Amino acid sequence: MNRSVRLIITSLFVLALSVQAQAQSITMKWDLSPQFQPIMEMVEDGDLDGAVSAMERLDRDSRNTAEYYFMAGQIDVMKVNEASALRAPFIARSMRKNWEKALEIDPSHELANFSLAMFYAAAPGIVGGDKDEAQRLQQRLVELESEWQYPLKVSLIGMKQAETEEAQVQRTEELKAAFGGWAEAQPDALTPRLSAASLLINEKDWEAAEDYLTQADALAERNEEIETEDRNMISYQWGKFAATSGQSLEVGRDRLLTLVDLEAYPAAINEGFVHFRLAQVFTHMNLTQARELHLEKAQQLAADDEQLKDALDEYLLAENTIAGG
């Protein structure tokens, strides 16, 4: 059965891009053996106990496959997220060994190549991180002509150290090019377009950001299989684009208000950020009462969100500076 997969890979992808953009989850196609389909569903739903129990019930033949060890590595990622600082390094080593075993059995297993490369790139050396190995696996995916080479390339660029302003600019340009290559190679893929739009909005490249958002809308219109979560994220990114650029204000306002009306907030976005973006949009539109309404709501929801607090502080400082003339 051919099934969309998000996987715990999403966590790794977000880790790679968290500085540059609000990265989106990766939704791509992968063929799963029937016995692993329900386990994948448990992984996607965050059901750690259910996934572990289901793996234990698999027969011997299923246990001696690359798919089994790939899935075991994914479950280890879930375990790391819940582990103490003391236990986490040991689970991380298990994760690495599971993916290495998957590739020992089947060197062409694309998701194991992708996951292990992400591990090598992100992990410290003490638990087996190895950036040279990450690059080797990237080249392996290129040789396999795998569609996973594109998100991996983006992720490896995103994890590059960039301590100077010049290095940061260079990394951003490399990311733009990598997203462009990914989008060109996969004309029906939403992830590169949404993630690229988020990056470009942060970089204030308004024309390119709007182009990617328009492409995302077109994909969502013609592809009924695109999930509600992804559609909501498209709407949020339109709102963020309007809020930060001062362009397409009516579009951004309507998209954000729809999210509020339906209480359809993307999983990765605090509800307060939606109200904050609305406050910004209404600032551009000189609608003071609406601005105050959503600004107050955003402030109420910022209590446990340092990122939102910082964004609000920066916004209010800029507004006060303008008002003070």
Image (cartoon, rainbow, N blue to C red):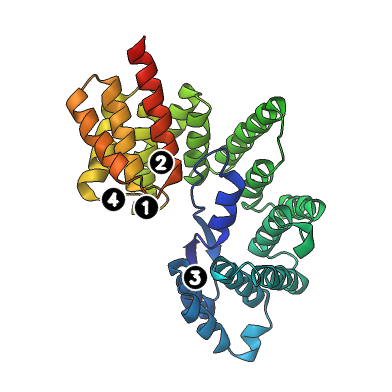
Asked if the residue under mark 1 is in contact with the one under mark 3, i.e. CB atoms within 8 Å, the reply is: no
Q: Residue at x 54, y 81 (%)?
A: 52
- In front of the other: 148 or 304: 304
- In front of the other: 218 or 101: 101
Secondary element under disc 1, as helix, strand or loop, is helix
Secondary element under disc 3, as helix, strand or loop, is helix
Q: CA distance from mark 3 to mark 1?
A: 17 Å
Please give the residue where the numbered disc 4 appears in the rendered image.
Answer: 264
Q: Is residue 119 above or below residue 179?
A: below
Upstream in the sequence, badge 4 or badge 2?
4
Q: CA distance from mark 4 to mark 2?
A: 18 Å
Q: Quadrant of the C terminus?
A: top left
Mark nearer the viewer, 4 or 2 = 2
Of the numbered discs in the image, which one, if any, rests on residue 206?
none
Q: CA distance from mark 2 to mark 1?
A: 21 Å
User: Which amino acid lies under the numbered mark 3 shown in the image of this protein?
Assistant: Val
> From this viewpoint, is residue 221 visible?
no
Q: Is residue 193 above or below residue 24?
A: above
Of the numbered discs in the image, which one, if any, rests on residue 43?
3
**Residue 225 image-quadrant placement:** bottom left
User: Which amino acid lies under the numbered mark 4 shown in the image of this protein?
Assistant: Ala
Secondary element under disc 2, as helix, strand or loop, is helix
Q: CA distance from mark 4 to mark 1?
A: 8 Å
Upstream in the sequence, badge 4 or badge 1?
1
User: Which amino acid lies under the numbered mark 1 shown in the image of this protein?
Assistant: Glu
Of the numbered discs in the image, which one, if any, rests on residue 229?
1
| Neighbour tally class for label 4: few under 14, some 14-19, many 20 plus, Cα within 10 Å | some
Task: Spot the residue most to the left.
Answer: 289
Please give the residue where the numbered disc 2 appears in the rendered image.
Answer: 308
